[in-house]
Amino acid sequence: MKYKMIAPAVPNIPWQDRPEGIKGAPIWRYSENPVVDRNPIDGVARIFNSAVMPYEGKFIGVFRGEQTNGVPYVYLGRSDDALHWTFDSEKVPFVDEEGKPFMPVYAYDPRLVKVEDTYYIIWCGDFYGAAIGMAKTKDFKTFTRIENPFIPFNRNAVLFPRRINGNFVMLSRPSDSGHTPFGDIFLSESPDMTYWGRHRHVMSAGHEWWESVKIGGGAAPIETSEGWLLFYHGVATTCNGFVYSIGGAILDIDHPSVVRYRCENFILTPEAEYEERGFVPNVVFPCATLHDSETNRIALYYGAADSVVGVAFCNMDDIIDYIKDHSVVRETDTEIGRR
Ligand code: BMA
């Protein structure tokens, strides 16, 4: 292996070898995609943009379930192989610090990140406007809401999997109240998961045409010997609406507001039928990876067409090389991001 992945070994992550004839970025779709299909549970029409994690030798995840009344919520799912999932029929029962029910008005695009001994769920919800909601759990039985980190409007928040320079670190995308036609990725720090500050700009939309409208943090960054490997989403506009693709960047390990490498090409763009066609066509939206530091294998989980969940595989060394070989960084990437 060329580069080091600084993460636990998870030898049972799903995997398929690279097929012949891959063009562009060295990443390939699971041949049995989608792994979660429509109408997965009673009362839920579609599960997509969702995040999974290794847990007790198996896998667990938080899933965006679009209810049949149209309201999105977070549902818990479990799997032995991270490909076949069973879901709780009830929404995740969030409580407040006193243990009383405290359900978000709605919750979508959940991320799931373990920092130290706690699992954090981060979503976009209503805080008198779209903003970031958060909860923590240690046992996936009690889910305690913690303070909303940011005032509206904000979306696409994801935590780094460890403290950096003593603080928790979160990426997010300040936005507006609608289908935001702009947006850069920022970073904020917190000593305690309550107070967030030392905000820094990380990277701008608009570098390349495929990400010309807005970008947003995707999967939790993976710690590597080359820096933090980030899969994010980038949005282009067309005469028929937005197109969501997946991009790749490598952030500085100690100062992650500094972008070391940023791939000028998308890593994955809607091509498969289930990505091009669906409730919202032409969307691939990354929310999590499973990764194994013994083999440097990565399984990337993404929502497809706001309808289903897909998995794509890549080898970390190859994807880092591809990002480096096609890297274009500008001043807004390489500066510390403070004005
Ligand atoms: C964004 C979010 C995502 C969704 C995407 C495409 O604004 O709502 O959940 O996948 O739009 O519809």
Image (spheres, rainbow, N blue to C red):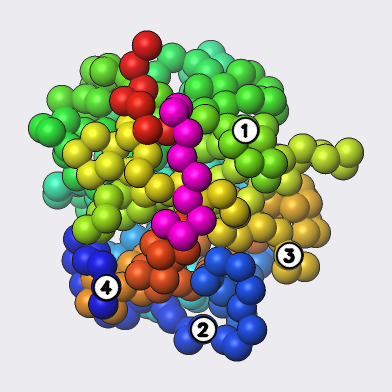
Mark 1 and mark 2 lie on one chain; the one further toward the N terminus is 2
Q: Determine the CA span between mark 1 and mark 2.
A: 31 Å
> Label 4 belongs to which residue?
2
List x then y, in percent, for residue 147.
Answer: 31, 22
List x then y, in percent, for residue 101.
Answer: 37, 31
Figure check: 3 above or below 12: above
The magenta segment: 324-332
Q: Is residue 201 visible?
A: yes
- Mark 2 belongs to which amino acid? Arg
- Mark 1 belongs to which amino acid? Gly
- Residues under numbered marks 4 and 1 in contact, where contact means CB atoms less than 8 Å apart: no
- Residues under numbered marks 2 and 3 in contact, where contact means CB atoms less than 8 Å apart: no
Foreground disc of the pair 1, 2: 1
- Mark 3 belongs to which amino acid? Glu
Figure check: 113 above or below 103: below
Image position of 317 (left or right of 85): left
Q: Element under label 1?
A: loop
Foreground: 110 or 234?
A: 234
> Label 1 belongs to which residue?
206
The disc at residue 271 is 3
Image point (73%, 65%), residue name: 271
Mark 4 and mark 2 lie on one chain; the one further toward the N terminus is 4
